[in-house]
Amino acid sequence: MKHPSAGERDDQWLTAVAEGASRDAGGVPVELLGDYLFMLADAAIAGRRPKRAELDAVEALGRRAAEQGISAGRAVQLYLSAARRLWHDLPTVVRSRDREAVRAAASAVLHVVDDAVATLAEGYAMARRDLVRREESLRRELVDDLLRGDSDPGALVDRAEPFGLDLARSHQVALASASQRLPDAEAAISALEAVIFDRLGDRDVMVATKDGLLVVLAPAETVAPGGAPPGRDATELGRLMHDQLRRLPRGQPWRIAVGRPHPGLYGIARSYEEAREALTMATRLRLETPIVNARELLIYRVLLRDQPAIVELVHAVLSPLEQARGGAEPLLSTLRAYFETGGVATETAKRIHVSVRAVTYRLDRVRALTGYDPSDPAHRFTLQAAVLGARALDWPAAPLSGLP
């Protein structure tokens, strides 16, 4: 074998070194070495330091490795293995020099290795940051279009595929709202991704932000009657999110709203709208529970779909309660508790912390003022619908609007 002298290069020898380094690194393409081996050989034989243009070329190779999906560890291993193999196979003339010459050659080679590996890693990191920013931008745009539901279906299917989304399946959307401004979004997204991917897998799952809310898109198998997927409680996703988010140092308390599962592309937008409405309704109803399910608030959506009608119902049935001493609220809270406990006075008394006699007295006052008897099945439906409507409209705390 002919070895290069200080003024010449043996491409065949360096090719063998490159191929061996590629094998050591698990098959990383030798093209990613560029002129690195020539730089090492020149350093060992002539003590030459790499030029800026040569290091710029190494940085570009680092970017190319990242774009090709090669891990940073394997790219660095390629360069270190190449240096080890080249030093081992250096011409006899180099290895036979005196101690100071060998020390100078080794120092020059190590300088090249340091500079080249650091530059390679820098280029790799820059490319990864660019890729992450590009992916996050594409993710946000995809999530926005999926939740809006008015984009070209064919294009959405193509854009969703790289993210592992099968838009033909059933999905549900859950939203997380922080008590204040959303804290570190990246930390929250990472925390949710870790637990959700572990529990549900990374297929058909996306975590993103929209309008200050954390958005989780998750798969739901064939939807069972009532809107709950078999094998998984409809609120499981909400509990999973809440358990993870409450561990974060900021954002407490969190409120989670979970939309119902729906099939197909437009089902995603539908589930999202349900979750948004559930968040709004939970705030309006002053619900204490941190997790709300859109399915449980359907009655309020039905009532508010024709808001002028429900306003008229509340006014016609319940406005006489304002004539009571203390106003309408004590009687209204008694009615709510009475209906929620199935019309049992003793349970109503426990819930609102009054005596059974006080409950009976208040129900009698409701009957006297409104003309509707809470214990009469013929009157009960009208009264209960009016009570639900009052809660949805935040009456009597807020005035009834839209009345003539």
Image (cartoon, rainbow, N blue to C red):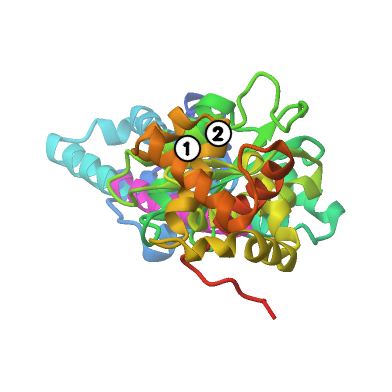
* Residue placed most toward the observer, 384 or 252: 384
Q: Is residue 267 visible?
A: yes
Measured in 3D between alpha carbons, the distance from the residue under mark 2 to the one under mark 1, in whole angstroms, is 6 Å
Q: Note whether 163 is above or below 54 in the view shown.
A: above
Amino acid at the residue labelled 1 = Met
Give neighbour class at mark 2: few <14, some 14-19, many 20+ (Cα, 10 Å). many
Give the magenta-colored segment's residue range.
113-140
Where residue 100 sits, quadrant-wise, is top left
Amino acid at the residue labelled 2 = Leu
Q: On the rendered image, what quadrant is the C terminus found in?
A: bottom right
Residue farthest top in this picture: 231
Image position, residue 26 (x, y; %): 53, 26
* Residue placed most toward the observer, 195 or 358: 358
Residue farthest bottom in this picture: 404
* Residue placed most toward the observer, 352 or 52: 352
Image position, residue 290 (x, y; %): 44, 42
What residue sits 64% from the left and 54% below the top?
371
Give the labeled residue for mark 2.
237
* Residue placed most toward the observer, 351 or 9: 351
Predominant SS along the magenta part: helix
